[in-house]
Amino acid sequence: MASDSESNMDREIILADFQACTGIDDIAEAITLLELNNWDLVAAINGVIPQENGILQSNLSSVASQANIYGPHSQAAPAAPPAAPAASSSSSSAFCPALPSRHIVERQPRMLNFRVEYRQRTVEVVIEEGSVVGEIKQILETELQVPVSKMQLKGWKSGDVSDSIVLQSLHLPKNNSLYVLTPDITPTASTSQNSVLQESLNQNFLLVISHREAQRDYNLNFPGSRTIQEVKRNVSDLTNIPVRHQQWEGWPASASDSMTLAASGISYPCHHLGVCRRSSPANTQEPTEECADVHMVSDSEGDDFEDASEFGVDESEMFGMGTSTGCRKAPLMPENTENEVDALLHFTAEFTTRYGECHPVFFIGTLEAASQEAFYGKARDRKLLAIYLHNDESVLGNVFCSQMMCADSIVSYLSQNFITWAWDVTKEANKARLLTMCTRHFGSVVAQTIRTYKTDQFPLLLIVMGKRTSNEVLNVIQGNTTVDELMMRLMGAMEIFTAQQQEDIKDEDEREAREMVKREQDEAYQLSLEADRKKREAQEREQAEQLRLQQIQKEADDEKEAIRLSLEHALPPEPAEEGGEPISKLRIRTPSGEFLVRRFLGSTKLQVLFDFVASKGYPWEDFKLLTTFPRRNITQLDPASSLLEAKLFPQETLFLEAKE
């Protein structure tokens, strides 16, 4: 028990020293870090404070050097917050005896570099690792004049983070890239009139303009830097009322044509105006289009421009309603095209001619091929399908293409995460063909949805996600949007797709694992069958060989038996013991120890003796016939000589011996 108490006391001292040295106030976090290092104080501090900035191997020189372990932190960036609080002298002194061979020198805070992009601006932020995310936003608020409450800081690898998150807990590298989204900026109060005017120049004003004679409204978005004269010229293109014949209602009394909208005193964010002809010239062309939401500039791009000529088109072309036939451009897609590939090649070439090289990579192929490319590969390789539908008769077409589809951020995001397929529905024949393709691949609901959109609502960007049994349209983005809104909706679709993709990857991995197990089992089974087959074939071959050998042996035995019988029948009869001729009595010992006894005439040839022995199963080709003493090999004698000549008379004992 005393040992446990001493151990707990030691850990309390280590915990206190660790908190004093690192400035970590959260006891649970401190205990977790110490447990990860087995309560090794120096290792734990090294894990929190990089060695190049914090702990060094050194001999302890004096108590005074230990008392100054953590001095004040230098500020690397003006907006960086103070680092962790310095340890007190008492805490340092308590810590010093525990480290007889090390001491802690002054620790410089680890600095993080952030490259933050906002519209076409880039801000470099250097801040301490111990700061929170909100402090980065405070720096950006000063640099960008964007309120923190309206700022969305994106690009974190771990997803969206709150302003109170400490950067150190995100485990970031030294250099990082982020970007700012401001989808809903509201005006902020300022004590300086010049500051208010500058903010107004960057804001978008919605002008609701009522065309009295046509009895229709136009909802037009303009930057605050646009002059009233420029607005009137744009409205002239929409209404066919020349500027000199326009009669306006709703402009402030102090406003002049040379004033910007920001300085004119109109209401923000929306201001209502009325326009009609000052005189009544003949042949006034009545507009036939329905109400259109026209955005002259995206609040994401941030670049004020004086007129549409900066984008390579005049203002009438931006609205798609130019009055001069000489300004009409070639269609993006020829009418009644027979080959979809040729049509898309023409679309891409014409799109590049109009809006430049920076645009999404359009898939060259049929809609079915694009769907196959996006949906039907391995789960990890699948992408969303973005279907861009263009209509040259829409007032939004040029603005959407030049400012949305050609924005660097949109081009990059689409290229990385989408298969982009395009089609031009300006011509009715091409639109009908598109509806047929959509019905075949996505069902009648999608085709009917496209039919419901009016000309002024084009272009459309359909975001389609492939599912297990069908394809689902996640979003239909209309032309009256901004870069920020477009990016947010694309990112929202990607979040849905990513969640579904993770499920598909999991299912695919499980399916592949099952198939692999099945393949391995099948392979093992086939190998087992093959082994059994080979074993069976070997046994059959062995049996066949045994049968063959047995057959050969049997034939040999039969042959020997036949020879033996023929020899036995050919032997002369055994003579009687008493006769007129000399008789030789022979006793022959076999290898098994038995004796063969027979009488022969003295004149009998040795061959008859050999045949007799062979008839008993001992052919002279395999056996030698020997005398006992003196030892002689009878089989080497001339078979034609007689027993008398061989001196095997009147009796003799012989023995058989196998030849070597």
Image: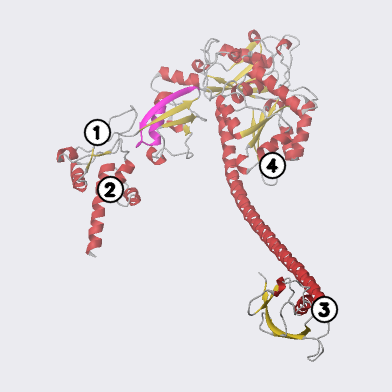
Q: Which residues are magenta?
A: 120-140
Three-letter amino acid code of the residue under disc 4: Asn
Real-space CA distance between mark 1 and mark 3, rounded to the nearest whole angstrom? 125 Å
Q: Nearer the viewer, residue 206 or 566?
A: 566
Real-space CA distance between mark 2 and mark 1, rounded to the nearest whole angstrom? 23 Å
Q: Are marks 3 and 2 in contact (CB under 8 Å)?
A: no
The residue labelled by disc 3 is 565
Three-letter amino acid code of the residue under disc 3: Leu
Q: Earlier in the sequence, mark 1 or mark 4?
A: 1
Residue in the image at 18% along x and 44% along y: 93
User: What SS does tag 2 mark?
Assistant: helix
Quadrant location, the C terminus? bottom right
Is 347 part of what is drawn in magenta?
no
Q: Earlier in the sequence, mark 2 or mark 1?
A: 2
Real-space CA distance between mark 3 and mark 4, rounded to the nearest whole angstrom? 96 Å
Residue 189 in view, yes or no: no
The residue labelled by disc 4 is 471
**Looking at the rendering, which quadrant does residue 370 occupy?**
top right
Q: Position of residue 649 (x, y in %)?
A: 72, 83
Judge whether 429 appears above or below 324 on screen: below
The residue labelled by disc 1 is 72
Disc 2 crowd rating (10 Å Cα; few below 14, some 14-19, many 20+) is many
Q: Position of residue 14 (x, y in %)?
A: 25, 50
Three-letter amino acid code of the residue under disc 1: Pro
Residue in the image at 75% along x and 74% along y: 619
Real-space CA distance between mark 2 and mark 4, rounded to the nearest whole angstrom? 57 Å
Mark whose residue sits in front, 2 or 1: 2
Q: Earlier in the sequence, mark 3 or mark 2?
A: 2
Q: Are marks 1 and 4 in contact (CB under 8 Å)?
A: no
The residue labelled by disc 2 is 41
Three-letter amino acid code of the residue under disc 2: Leu
